[in-house]
Amino acid sequence: MAPVVSQHPWDSQSLPHGKHPSILSSLSTHHPAPGEEWLVKQVGAYLPGVYEEVVDVVDAYILTDKKALHLRATRTFEDEQGRVRRTGEEWLVTQAQSEAYIPEVFEEVVAEVAVTTLGPRQYCVVLDPVGPSGQPQLGQQRVVKGEKSFFLQPGEQLQAGIQDVYVLSEDEGLLLQALQTIKDTNEEGTEVMRRAGDRWLARGPLEYVPPAEVTVLERRQAVALADNEGIYVRDIRTGKVRVVTGQTYMLTEAEELWEKDLSPGVEALLAEARGDTRSVDAGVRSSSSLDVGVPQRDRTRAVTYQVPHNAAVQVYDYRERRARVVLGPELVVLGPGEQLTVLSLSAGRPKRPHARRSLCLRLGPDFCADIVTIETADHARLQLQLAYNWHFEVPEDPKALGRLFSVPDFVGDACKALASRVRGAVAAVTFDDFHKNSNRLICSAVFGFDEGGRLREQLRFAPNGLVVTSVDIQSVEPVDQRTRDALQRSVQLAIEIATNSQEAAARHEAERLAQEARGRLERQRLLDQAEAERARRALLELEALSAAVESAGAARAEAQARAEAARIEGEAAILQAKLKAEAIAIETEAELSRLERAQAQEVRAQRARGEAEAARAQALADVEASRVREVAAALGPDTIRDIARAGPELQVKLLQGLGLQSTLITDGTAPLNLFATARGLLGLGPPPESSAPQGPTL
């Protein structure tokens, strides 16, 4: 039978004055106060008394090794073990204390607590743990390591849930920081003192569970670097940045990775050198196109650039304020304060400044083309397309290599200087002279003559060592229409004379060739007829052989096709069965996952409703208690005593006025014990105890 909670509904004002103590003693040995509630746990049937009211039937909570009960005292009382529970006190009841627990009248079930289970590679941090005295230690933490199962006491909670133990390999480490002064052991096994704020690195291989006084800042892994790879490492104590290359390196506790920033233009040029051409357009690149679509690189990795063969790169160190030139083929690894020098060169025809940017300087031999507009002495304007072959003279002294980059735009400067020389030389001659001697005139203007009057073979620019070896006139086009017409008539006349001469020579040669051709044609016709007969005989033989091969191939192909069709059908059936099995497994796993999420959500919802209901009941009880205290305080003890005595005194005075010796007042709903009344009138005393129902007596 489930326990019954009973309540006594009496009010002291409903009994005659001075009679209720005897009435209570006649009912039972227990004397409950009006409004008192108690719990009946006896096994068997229970018949509530006349002045008892059944409030609720309480079912017992079944406790297991995976479930405990969280209780709260609604008022101060003494439990069955004799321990005094104060109002608001919370505690936990487990299976070790009782397998089936029935909450007392003044006990409130807060929630059912599930067991917390830790595996052999798990741990957790408990916040505000309960101490030996049973009181929560606010602000403290306790680390619990697995393998273990326990219940969270009231007020306790997990900091970050159940966490896995840090398992580190030999190339991994943990960056730790002490939250308060503790004693620890270093890698050599000696004891060291860690002060609050100290940082250190725990290196693997090991299994590590951080104490409550230690926090894990970062999990680090050694970086394997090849000879042409590196990382930027910054010392957080001194701020010094260095490059680590060609080894497997793990950051210490006083080091961190440092990001090296480069300009967007350099980033785009480096991406192009790596083979990523998404950030630049084909052909001529403008400065605005270098900032679009550049893929992000790892800025902690050392910036490397492969200098091509027969090229040079200038690297400037802004910290030491010096530059170095690297000749290719070579790999450049930039230091923390080094930057690559960007060359802004002219490009196009005619040359446009800042049309092309590059990190490396090509040493040549190479060529560049330009379009130059000139004007002769007779004011004939011509447009020349010139091509220059050039190369750089590389000095043997490494300290003198910096002169290669002394002229930022060597292409534009060289083309401007050469165009100026050509325009000056052409301006002194007429159009006819220039048309007849254009090559000699332009070469003499570009290269000049030596002391002996001989044409120089090259032109050297002293500031940067650029050498121009040859000039090629690719085209000459007049600018104005009059000059173009005169030049066209002259060219047409020369072409007509050459054409007539070539026609006469060609006609004579054609007649001679025609006679020879007719003789060879007749001889070839006879040879072709003999060859045709031999080919016809071979054709008949091949046709017979082809018919035999065709019949045999058709039969073989049909047999192979049937065998291949049977094999394909078998493989398709096997694949279909596998796919069906995988589909069933996926559906089963999806349904199981959905049920688990639904059940977990239902448990959280029920727990939230229980906590809200408990808070509401507590608030109502506090309001009711406050109201009763305020009413009692407002009336005062004297007024309450007078109110309680007014009813019985009035009844006594009324009876005395009527002259009655005894009376019985009832509402007709309660049974009367006439036997007890008669024995009282005869003076025989109370009747012996019996199982008959008791009611009001006179």
Image (tube, helix red, strand yellow):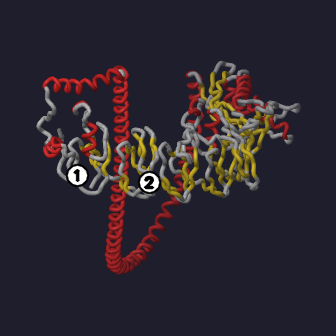
Tell me the SS state at disc 1.
loop
* Neighbourhood count class around disc 2 (C-alpha, 10 Å): few under 14, some 14–19, many 20 upward: many
Query: In what quadrant of the picture does the N terminus appear?
Result: bottom left
Residue extending farthest left:
668
Q: Is the residue 456 above or below the residue 118 in the image?
A: above
> Relative to the observer, which residue lies in front, 661 or 473?
661
Quadrant for residue 651, please give it: top left
> Relative to the observer, which residue lies in front, 358 or 197?
197
> Relative to the observer, which residue lies in front, 60 or 416?
60
The residue at the point 48 percent across, 47 percent down is: 153
Tell me the SS state at disc 2.
loop
- Nearer to us of marks 1 and 2 is 1
Q: CA distance from mark 1 to mark 2?
A: 43 Å
Q: Which residue is mark 2?
A: 94
* Res 314 seen here: no
* Res 151 seen here: yes
Q: Amino acid at mark 2?
A: Thr
Q: Residue 302 in the image: x percent, y percent? A: 69, 43
Q: Which residue is mark 1?
A: 689
Q: Is the residue 240 above or below the residue 96 in the image?
A: above
Quadrant for residue 471, please give it: top right
Q: Amino acid at mark 1?
A: Glu
Q: Residue 693 in the image: x percent, y percent? A: 18, 48
